[in-house]
Amino acid sequence: MASKKGSNNKKSQTCLNIEIQDFIEIGNDIPADDLLPIWAQEQENMVPSIITDTDQIDQPIKYIAGLDISFVKTNDKAVASMVIFDYETLDIVAKISVHCIMKIPYIAGYLAFREAPVFIKLIDIQKQHCPHLTPQVILIDGNGVWHPRRAGSASHFGVLSGIPCFGVSKNVLYVDSITRDKIHELLTEKAPEKDQYIEVTDDSGNVLGIAYNVTGSIKQSVYISVGHKITLKTACDIFKSVTKYRICEPIRQADLLSREIVAKLS
């Protein structure tokens, strides 16, 4: 795995740490089932706005970030975190977290409506407190166009924020005839070794993303898909450059941070 490392010749940057402890409420009292047709239509309407064939990234890339959210198991509290990295050194330059009350349940295929609003809040906080650290690319724990309606959480967030982003998922999202067993069979046949990957297409031959064998264990593969304003090749290259373990560092650190804060709320 070709990963970047913090430079021994450069002094580590000071890390800014922001935690908004006032709970923001995500969702309302309308039953989610009543909203599904509306949400599905929103996703379909969003598809023409999703850019996947060109990179619209400000160069050179100086900062990238990972987004993730963790939930308290016993109630509806959650914490969303963004960790911003210096792309050259992989030093962490900022950690931003926000507490929220999550009224929207998890529904497969509609993750964006649960997470995108709080992720946008993180971006708003970042722009308010440290606009000079605005990331040029964001990595999200989830899917982009690898989605039943081709508009997963990474694409949804990308269109709303205007920031180039892509999704990295630990699980196979079933689309058309794609199943976990089918992907594992293809990986076993075509990409059995560490750092090998396969392109995944839907039943019409359209590319959904990449199944990436990070560690050499097929079951530990991850699934990369374009969110918005980035090509799959660039997303894959960035993923490789910021990955030390199975989970790429931006998402791994955002996950660790949100879990750490959630543990204090439990």
Image: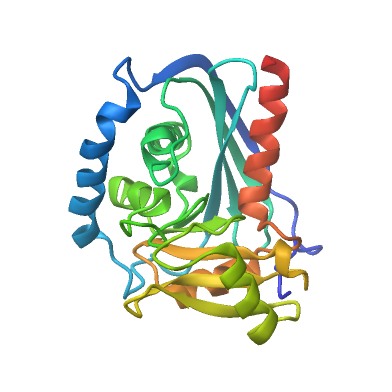
- Tell me the residue at 37%/47% (across/down): 157
- Tell me the residue at 64%/22% (across/down): 73
Q: Nearer the viewer, residue 218 or 248?
A: 218
| Quarter occupied by residue 244 | bottom right
- Relative placement, left or right, of 238 versus 42 is right
Q: Position of residue 120 (x, y in %)?
A: 38, 37
Q: Quadrant of the N terminus?
A: bottom right
- Relative placement, left or right, of 78 versus 59 is right
Q: Nearer the viewer, residue 193 or 261?
A: 193
- Tell me the residue at 63%/22% (across/down): 72
| Quarter occupied by residue 194 | bottom right
Q: Position of residue 163 (x, y in %)?
A: 37, 53
Q: How many marks?
A: 0
Residue 52 vertical placement versus 71 (above, below): below
Q: Position of residue 142 (x, y in %)?
A: 50, 51
Q: Residue furthest right?
A: 8
Residue 26 vertical placement versus 174 (above, below): above
Q: Residue furthest bottom?
A: 190
- Tell me the residue at 70%/77% (across/down): 195
Q: Quadrant of the C terminus?
A: top right
Q: Position of residue 84 (x, y in %)?
A: 57, 47
Residue 9 vertical placement versus 124 (above, below): below
Residue 212 vertical placement versus 33 (above, below): below
Q: Nearer the viewer, residue 264 or 133?
A: 264
